[in-house]
Image (spheres, rainbow, N blue to C red):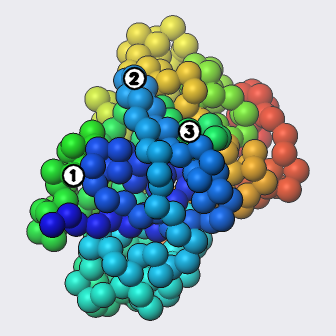
């Protein structure tokens, strides 16, 4: 008997993760917007990655209403953070008690939001550490490395082999919060990349942009220290030392952090995609989360607050920032 998986909010991450599962034999139902449904009906799914993977799914089961998740044993929630509460309400009306629900979203609070409404389901907090670029015509490309991270839960056991077969093994953690904050520290680059209007590798190759990221990360690390939260180590360099590495001259950075620059030339951030498409971004759940943490501690986060303001402005008036100009703005 096959276990059925549903992807709720099938955009870039949802189509990629669900597509890898479907391409390797796992029944997957995708639930999302009519625009994506029409695109996949015409082109199918084409999944590629920076290691050379090339997978296709010709006939994609795609639904545009929450009822599409009713028969699922496992639901992967991949909606944007602002839509999490609404997704929880919709899923509560259709999911059976005991259904496993995994949040594969940015930010640090989405699991809690889902759990508060899905009281009869098993909600597991997860995280997607890699970037996925929607190239159009059903093509979704993973441009950076990383396994899927989840809170350890026995309810995930029936699905582990399916994720391994898909090339997306689940890395389980006893405490997911330090991992979430470590990913958020890296995601503080999302607005910088979006404002630069450059591919990730080109942006990170320039010291001025890296100094912007270093400022945002250093500010956040100080707040996390005050809150007693120690982020997990996701890179070879400990997170508390990463701002120092980012500030190095280009030639030293290339030598000491070559793995950071070893990203696919196509890699972009989802925030860049949102600005290009004229969509509202997730800035409130990334740098905005840092601002909320500062407020809870009676402190401020001026660098991250300014990045929030710049992205909100870019949502209505798009412009490209040079590294030096952006660094001056944040200083």
SS at mark 1? helix
Mark before the other along the chain sequence, 3 or 2: 2
Q: Is residue 236 visible?
A: yes
Image position of 58 with respect to 54: above or below? below
Tell me how far mark 1 sits from mark 2, CA to CA. Answer: 20 Å
| Residue identified by numbered label 1 | 162
The residue located at (73%, 58%) in the rendering is 279
Name the one closer to the observer, 104 or 23.
Answer: 23
The residue located at (77%, 41%) in the rendering is 329
Tell me how far mark 1 sits from mark 3, CA to CA. Answer: 22 Å
Mark before the other along the chain sequence, 1 or 3: 3
Mark before the other along the chain sequence, 1 or 2: 2
The residue located at (35%, 50%) in the rendering is 22
- Residue 143 placed where, x, y %? 48, 32
Give residue 212's mark: none
SS at mark 3? strand
| Residue identified by numbered label 3 | 139
Q: Left or right: where does residue 325 sit relative to residue 84?
A: right
**On the image, which quarter does residue 212 sit in?**
top right
Tell me how far mark 3 sits from mark 2, CA to CA. Answer: 14 Å
**On the image, which quarter does residue 206 sit in?**
top right
| Residue identified by numbered label 2 | 52
Q: Left or right: where does residue 161 sit relative to residue 69?
A: left
- Residue 276 placed where, x, y %? 75, 45
């Amino acid at each position: 008997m096959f276990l059925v998986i549903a992807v709720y909010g099938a955009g870039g991450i949802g189509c990629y993760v669900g597509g890898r599962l479907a391409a390797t034999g796992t029944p997957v139902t995708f639930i999302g917007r009519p625009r994506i449904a029409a695109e996949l009906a015409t082109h199918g799914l084409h999944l590629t990655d920076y290691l050379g993977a090339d997978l296709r799914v010709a006939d994609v089961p795609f639904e545009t209403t929450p009822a599409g998740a009713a028969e699922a044993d496992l639901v992967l929630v991949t909606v944007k953070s602002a839509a999490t509460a609404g997704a929880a309400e919709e899923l509560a009306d259709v999911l059976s008690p005991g259904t496993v629900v995994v949040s594969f979203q940015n930010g640090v609070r989405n699991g809690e939001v889902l759990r508060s409404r899905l009281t009869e389901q098993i909600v597991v907090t997860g995280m997607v550490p890699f970037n996925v670029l929607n190239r159009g015509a059903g093509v979704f490309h993973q441009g950076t490395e990383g396994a899927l991270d989840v809170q350890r839960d026995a309810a995930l056991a029936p699905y582990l082999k399916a994720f391994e077969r898909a090339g997306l093994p689940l890395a389980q953690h006893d405490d997911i919060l330090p991992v979430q904050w470590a990913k958020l520290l890296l995601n503080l680059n999302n607005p910088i990349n979006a404002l630069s209007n450059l591919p990730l590798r080109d942006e990170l190759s320039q010291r001025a942009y890296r100094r912007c990221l270093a400022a945002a990360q250093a500010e956040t690390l100080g707040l996390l220290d005050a809150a007693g939260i120690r982020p997990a180590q996701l890179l070879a360099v400990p997170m508390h030392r990463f701002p120092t590495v980012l500030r190095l001259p280009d030639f030293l950075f290339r030598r000491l952090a070559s793995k950071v620059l070893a990203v696919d030339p196509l890699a972009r951030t989802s925030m860049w995609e949102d600005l290009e498409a004229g969509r509202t971004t997730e800035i409130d759940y990334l740098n905005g989360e840092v601002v909320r943490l500062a407020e809870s501690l009676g402190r401020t986060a001026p660098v991250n607050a300014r990045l929030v303001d710049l992205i909100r402005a870019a949502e209505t008036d798009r412009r490209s920032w040079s590294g030096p100009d952006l660094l001056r703005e944040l200083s």
